[in-house]
């Protein structure tokens, strides 16, 4: 690492914990809840897509334990890149940018923030969705902006990630009020109003998991807002 690195790395084992929380959450029932949302406004495959992406990532990690943050996040990225649906490749590229944010060991908060912003930009470059189009972007943009805005003040990483998670959840919840402008949900018009966007909900849970991985809190996330 060069001495231009700003800040100290996130907590030891952050990447492995983040990934483990994603496995626990999505392979432990949350994927089904999100699949139900996709059945209301899309084609119903979202739950399967996310569960099979993470199932594949877990299989790879079980076969050969990743060495560091980059290895864990790369396993997640590969899991999604091998999965169908619109969300598979988009999340695959998103996690690839996150994996690349750190050279060795755990990323600093600034590196993670840069990785998150890069991932969001990639998803937007391919998906052409803006905030308000009722997609994963509605959760990811507020999270990336929250983290970016907290960096200059030298915020505590756990608090900064908790705030990013709160912004992501708020953004995901706001999708319930919208009709979709991108993705399959855009074919059903007003029918989608009142239903959370599953991709936005999943993206918010990903940010919640990052916050939990840093704070060392219990692995079970509070995702009651998904069904609220
Ligand atoms: P499909 O609609 O092809 O079945 P999935 O069910 O795997 O895809 O994923 C649906 C999710 O993908 C949506 O909830 C939404 O968040 C996300 N999505 C769809 N289109 C876009 C897009 N153009 N940009 C960003 N995210 C999108
Ligand atoms: Mg679908």
Image: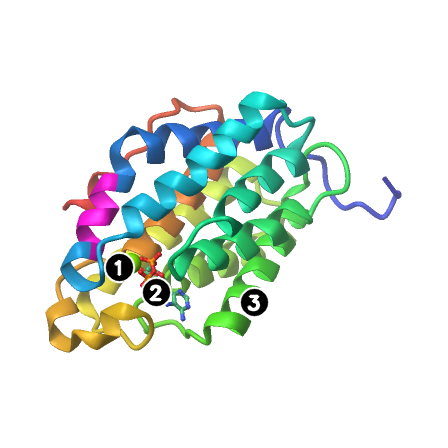
What is the C-alpha distance between the residues marked 3 and 1? 19 Å
- 125 above or below 196? below
**Residue 179: x and y, percent?**
21, 74
Asked whether the viewer can see residue 166, the reply is no
Query: Measuring 77% from the left and 42% from the top, which residue is drawn there?
Result: 103
Q: Which colour scheme is used?
A: rainbow
Q: Nearer the viewer, residue 63 or 97?
A: 63
Q: Is mark 3 on a helix, strand or loop?
A: helix
- 137 above or below 205? below
Q: Is mark 2 on a helix, strand or loop?
A: loop
**Which residue is under mark 1?**
197
* Residue 177 figure quarter: bottom left
Residue sitting farthest toward the right: 2
User: Mostly what secondary structure, the magenta segment?
Assistant: helix
**Residue 50: x and y, percent?**
37, 45
Q: Are the residues at dot 2 and dot 3 in contact (C-beta closer than 8 Å)?
A: no
**Which residue is under mark 3?**
121
Query: Measuring 38% from the left and 54% from the top, which residue is drawn there?
Result: 167
Ligand 1's quadrant: bottom left
Label 1, residues with CA under 10 Å away: few <14, some 14-19, many ≥20: many
Q: Are the residues at dot 1 and dot 2 in contact (C-beta closer than 8 Å)?
A: yes
What is the C-alpha distance between the residues marked 1 and 2? 6 Å
Q: Which of marks 2 and 3 is nearer the N terminus?
A: 3
- The part of the chain drawn in magenta is 32-38
Q: Does the magenta stretch include residue 19?
A: no
**Residue 115: x and y, percent?**
62, 53
Label 3, residues with CA under 10 Å away: few <14, some 14-19, many ≥20: some
**Which residue is under mark 2?**
135
Whether the residue carrying mark 1 lies under 8 Å from ligand 1 is answered with yes
Asked whether the viewer can see residue 97, the reply is yes
* Residue 1 figure quarter: top right
Label 2, residues with CA under 10 Å away: few <14, some 14-19, many ≥20: many
């Amino acid at each position: 690492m060069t001495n231009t690195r700003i800040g100290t790395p996130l907590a030891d084992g952050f990447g492995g914990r983040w990934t483990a929380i994603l496995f626990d959450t999505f392979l432990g029932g949350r994927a089904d809840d999100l699949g139900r949302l996709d059945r209301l406004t899309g084609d119903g495959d979202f739950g399967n897509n996310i569960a099979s992406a993470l199932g594949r990532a877990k299989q790879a990690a079980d076969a050969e334990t990743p060495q560091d943050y980059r290895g864990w996040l790369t396993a997640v990225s590969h899991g999604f890149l091998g999965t169908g649906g619109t969300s598979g490749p988009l999340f695959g590229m998103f996690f690839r940018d996150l994996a690349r944010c750190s050279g060795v060991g755990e990323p600093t908060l600034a590196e993670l923030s840069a990785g998150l912003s890069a991932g969001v930009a990639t998803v937007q470059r391919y998906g052409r969705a803006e905030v308000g189009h009722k997609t994963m972007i509605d959760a990811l943009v507020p999270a990336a902006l929250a983290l970016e805005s907290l960096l200059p003040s030298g915020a505590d990483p756990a608090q900064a990630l908790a705030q990013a998670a709160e912004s992501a959840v708020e953004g995901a919840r706001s999708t319930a009020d919208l009709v979709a402008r991108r993705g399959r949900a855009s074919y059903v018009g007003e029918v989608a109003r009142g239903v959370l966007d599953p991709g936005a909900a999943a993206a918010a849970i990903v940010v919640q998991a990052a916050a939990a991985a840093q704070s060392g809190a219990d692995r079970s996330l509070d995702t009651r807002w998904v069904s609220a």
